[in-house]
Amino acid sequence: MGEIVLIRHGQTEWSANGRHTSYTELDLTEIGEQQAREAGKRLQGRTFAAVISSPRRRALRTAELAGLSVTETTEDLAEWNYGEYEGITTATIHETVPSWKLWSDGAPGGESPEQVAERLDRVLAHARTLLDGGDVALVAHGHSLRVAGARWIGLPASGGALLKLDTATLSTLGFEHGEPAIDTWNAACS
């Protein structure tokens, strides 16, 4: 049985500045493009039964530069919808709402942790059906992939708060004695 390989997109201007980015379309920075190429080097020799990507340009470009052929895109892999907090840093949000935590409160006008978990559960269930054919790559975003990691091991979406995930890193979800397990997490590619 294969593994699920999580690939976070390369750096964008907003990810470099800590700004919440969900539906805003941003290009990779020059550093982000290099990160994506480095991820591709780490993936060389590995074949995928499927490569599923968020439809956002930054995820698709990362897959392209990593040498992956996307077999399908799904909104279910899109980043957490930050609603009114789109483009704003956590520090700025805390100036007016000091107790706010994405992982428990969600985003006003956006998604709750439970809504994000529901989407990622669908992605993981679909990916799991493909594992008999080999590894499956999921190319997406920081918070959505952190939720995927948490859900894979049976935690609520809020468990993603415990799983740091840098840009253009690789993580693998597999099995230990038949039970879902995290094989690697936040592995740098350079």
Image (cartoon, grey):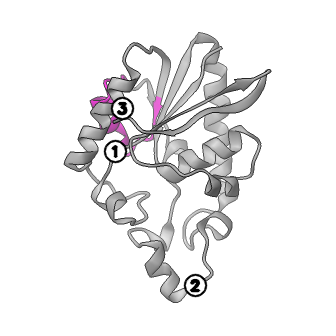
In the rendered image, the vertical position of residue 134 relative to residue 92, given as above or below: above
**Residue 80 pos. (x, y %):** 53, 56
**Residue 190 pos. (x, y %):** 33, 36
User: Which of the labelled discs sits on residue 150, or is there none?
Assistant: none
Instruction: Assess whether residue 41 is covered by the magenta stretch.
Output: no
**Residue 10 pos. (x, y %):** 34, 44
Q: Residue at x 43, y 68 (%)?
A: 86
In the rendered image, the vertical position of residue 139 relative to residue 86, given as above or below: above
Residue type pointed to by label 1: Gly
Residue type pointed to by label 3: Ala
Disc 2 to disc 3, how far (Cα)?
A: 36 Å
Left/right placement of residue 131 relative to residue 18 reads right
The magenta segment is 52-69
Contact (CB < 8 A) between labels 2 and 3? no
**Secondary element at image label 3:** helix
User: Which of the labelled discs sits on residue 98, or is there none?
Assistant: 2
Question: Residue beneath label 1, please?
Answer: 10
Instruction: Assess whether residue 68 is covered by the magenta stretch.
Output: yes
Looking at the image, the residue that sits furthest to the bottom is 96
10 Å neighbourhood of mark 2: few (<14), some, or many (≥20)?
Answer: few
10 Å neighbourhood of mark 3: few (<14), some, or many (≥20)?
Answer: many
User: Which of the labelled discs sits on residue 39, or is there none?
Assistant: 3
**Secondary element at image label 2:** loop
- Give residue 47's quadrant in the image: top left
Disc 3 to disc 1, how far (Cα)?
A: 9 Å
Residue type pointed to by label 2: Pro
Among the two numbered marks 2 and 1 on one chain, the one whose residue lies closer to the N terminus: 1
